[in-house]
Image (cartoon, helix red, strand yellow):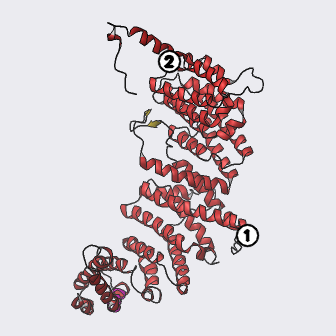
Amino acid sequence: YQRRVHGVGASKTSDALCENNMNIMRLLSEEIFDFSSGTMTQSKIKSLKETLNSEFGMIFELCQYVISNSQNQELLVETLQTLLKFLNWIPFGYIFETKLIEILGGRFLPTPVFRNHTIRCITEIACLDTPKQYEECFVTLFHGVMLQLGTMLPLPGDDNDAVHYAVHIPKLYAEGTEEDENFIANLSVFFTNFFRVHLSLVENNPNTAAQVINAHKYLIGISNVDNKEIFKTCLEYWTWLCEDVFTHWRGNNKDFQWTDAPPSTQRKNAYAVIFSDCRRTIIKKMVKPEEVCLVEDENGEITKELMPDVDIQQQYKSMREILILLTHLDPDDTETILLDKLCSQVDRSEWSWHNLNTLCWSIGTISGSMSEEEEKRFLVAVIKDLLGLCEMIRGKENKAVIASNIMYVVGQYPRFLRAHWKFLRTVIHKLFEFMHETFPGVQEMAVDTFLKISKQTKDKFVQAQAGEHQPFIEDILGDIRNITCDLEKHQSLVFYEAVGHMVSATQQERSEAMIIKLMEQPNFRWQTVIGKARPGCVHHLQPPPLI
């Protein structure tokens, strides 16, 4: 190993020898710093690290010589890959007290063949935990990257005819080469890692404050590309940023100096356009909540989901968290976006199962994040439009999709249902209608929603409401046969459980009579079975079906 280190000087005489040495040094760095655990003793690892650090001056000199002078593409790529493995452990002076960052950003980043290797190196530098003395270097690094991106991947203009960046970058991704796709993916990693560590530095620097907003426009565009892994990377960052801005807003930090607005709102206002675009992106890409039973299969048909997707459930939780944060930051903008999108469903300009699903899942997701008055106004408009859409749209599958979304939305707003009895009663009657709909998954979701609402509002059903002569549960108990006649056995059990929760909210002297009435049909069927089970009639007894 030491002979190899001391022989790096000879590498300047031959590109092939130099490339070979670079490859060996990269593998050696990986062996010591990445893969040494479990394969070497700690003393051996420590000895190698100390030697590599003490001799690194010659190695770095060779790397700098190559990236400054060589024209050999293969050698330069190998050198960049080797540098990438060095950057997370070499002394900071080699990075910040030399021309390394300037060379990476000025010579290699704009060149297509080198840009992916370069942006990975720059990302590695951005993640370093450095002393305060190097803070200005990170500002310079970010400024340089943004200047190069303005030429390499310019954002569309602000005029009305320009394609929005949320559409422009996904288009470039879809139509580009594999190298283009990789660069956009690497760019998302750079921005999200850099901002997590150094956002305040570049936010508060007058030379980079505007570039910070442009960088987040890039991230909005990248968030809209059709790639799940890239979206997960961006989603984690948006959650972090929203939490950071929300905490700053509520914490009334007075150090922020972008505008003359009150300190508590300056930063929130600075990101207003970005957050509005982020809301649209999250709504557009919202995934299915666990409560929804209907899915669109690979053949484009609506069917009942048989096996929940654990990854999708976890992603939904993340998207729910960020959309709630975004709603707290600006409930009016969230409401406007959602209602505009709903209008586009009603007028059929953007009608599709996917668009309606993601919209309604988003509407249900933000329950509780508006004030009670805002929520009332918003939900009344939403349910009115959805019910109108259900009446207007033809086709069993279309109606099933709309019904599924109505049930999900109403089940997510118990506060509103508790405060508006007439609306709650209408919702329950609608659920009873859906219990007769034999399209796969609709009945399942109807009884599940009925159970969910019953648990959350059970006391409302056992009280006589204004203008009614008896509690609504009496109407339910008197019509159980008709309500449940089309349900399967396991669905009937869910229905009975829901009514049981209502009964539990009554006083004991009333609940006994209600239980007798509730169990009238099951008891009658049981008595019929027992009556047939006389000696010699055992053929009437059959093994019960599995539920």
Is residue 190 among what the camera can see?
Answer: yes
Residue 388, position as x, y percentages in the image: 64, 30
For disc 1, the marked residue is 263
Helix, strand, or loop for circle 1? helix
Q: Is residue 109 left or right of residue 435?
A: left
Q: Main secondary structure of the magenta part?
A: helix
Is residue 398 among what the camera can see?
Answer: no
Indicate the quadrant containing the C terminus: top left, top right, bottom left or bottom right.
top left
Q: Which residues are magenta?
A: 57-64
Disc 2 crowd, CA 10 A, few/some/many (<14, 14-19, 20+): few
For disc 2, the marked residue is 522
Residue 340, position as x, y percentages in the image: 65, 44
Q: Nearer the viewer, residue 205 or 109?
A: 205
The amino acid type, in three-letter code, at marker 2 is Pro
Nearer the camera: disc 2 or disc 1: 2
Indicate the quadrant containing the N terminus: top left, top right, bottom left or bottom right.
bottom left
Residue at 68% x, 73% y is: 256
Q: Is residue 516 placed above or below 214 in the rendered structure? A: above
Disc 1 crowd, CA 10 A, few/some/many (<14, 14-19, 20+): some
The amino acid type, in three-letter code, at marker 1 is Pro
Q: Earlier in the sequence, mark 2 or mark 1?
A: 1
Q: Nearer the viewer, residue 209 or 490?
A: 490
